[in-house]
Image: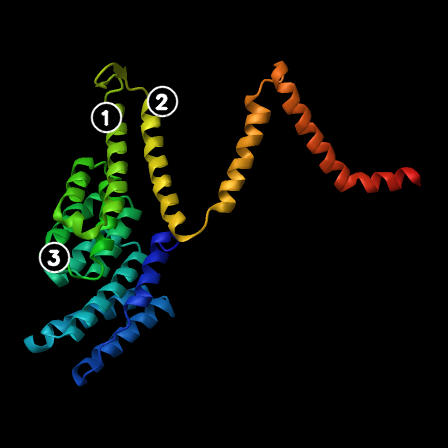
Amino acid sequence: MRSSSSTSLLCTRSVGSVRLHSPPSCSSIHFSGLLDSAVEYLMVKKDFRSAFDTCEKGLENLCSVSDQEESCSRHGELKAAFCIVGIQALAEVNHWCGILEWVLKHYNEAERVPAKIMQMCILLYSKVGQQDTMQGVASAWLCCPNNTNQPGFCTVAELYLLHVLLPLSRTAEAQELLESEVGKTAFTEDQRQVAMDIVQSQFVHQRQTVNPNLEVNSGVTTTMITPQGASNHWMNAVIRQLYRGLSVARARASLGALRRTLLAFLLLYLLIVRMDPALPSSFPWIFRLLQVFRQIWDAMFGPYYKASGQN
């Protein structure tokens, strides 16, 4: 996995996540030195085995501190930093299959895993095509009330929806997530609506794939879902998402130039493509269009040809 994009992503996250912001105490200087050594093994020397062993040593030493030390925020930051570097080291040597087990060994319960580490695990197992490994763990983490106030709660919910539930075609679980309190907390109303459209379109596509002859009652007539119809449903969902994206962009920037460009293309399309040249009524339009093109051509290249003819 050293050449995979997941490794680069994990490496990028780990570099920005091992920085400790709490003021160091006398008891944590030793752990900070171990953490610096682990980062040096990982990022500079590329000795991933030594980096993991150093993280393991640091985590074992953290377990031996007093209960008062364990309750402080410095202890939690050090533990998360050692786990982040250890995850990166395991991913580099292609031991990704044991990463989740190793993390749970040090945190005992999935609900106690920090949000940053949960995000890394979701991305990692999604990259290697093992999304089902994270389904139960991520679901339990999101349902824990203590994790709602974590800064990365919304990101974990988004990654769980996009990289676990949807790739596994868990449309029922995805819809349940969006309608639950977790979904209402993690997503805005617009985000939930866009996600609902994606889930519904995937649900229709999934049903059509399982039963191509499925009939859908439209209320007045009965239509048959064909591959073309499923594609239309998917395209409608995409168009709705693009429309919402344009609505957001319209609120942030002016779309005057875009409108003028689209209008010009629309006029050319109507004149050249949609209008039948064989119809007599189209002759004046085509004639005027040709006149405009001739005037543009004469204005741009006319003097050059006149000068060439005189010579």
Q: Secondary structure at mark 2?
A: helix
* Residue 86 vertical placement versus 184 (above, below): below
Q: Residue shown at 19%/40% (left/top)?
A: 174
* Residue 133 vertical placement versus 234 (above, below): below
Furthest residue in direction left, as rendered: 67
User: Would you call the spot at circle 3 few (<14 residues within 10 Å), some (14-19), or many (20 or more)?
Assistant: many
Instruction: State left or right for residue 243 relative to residue 55.
Output: right
- Residues at marks 1 and 2, CA–CA distance in whole angstroms: 14 Å
Pointer 1 residue: 207
Front residue of 264 and 273 = 264
Pointer 2 residue: 228
- Residues at marks 3 and 1, CA–CA distance in whole angstroms: 34 Å
- Name the spot of residue 72 as percent of width and height, x first: 12, 75
Q: Earlier in the sequence, mark 2 or mark 3?
A: 3
Q: Secondary structure at mark 1?
A: helix
The amino acid pointed to by label 1 is: Arg
Pointer 3 residue: 111
Q: Earlier in the sequence, mark 1 or mark 2?
A: 1
Nearer the camera: disc 1 or disc 2: 2
Q: Quadrant of the C terminus?
A: top right
- Name the spot of residue 133 as percent of width and height, x first: 19, 46
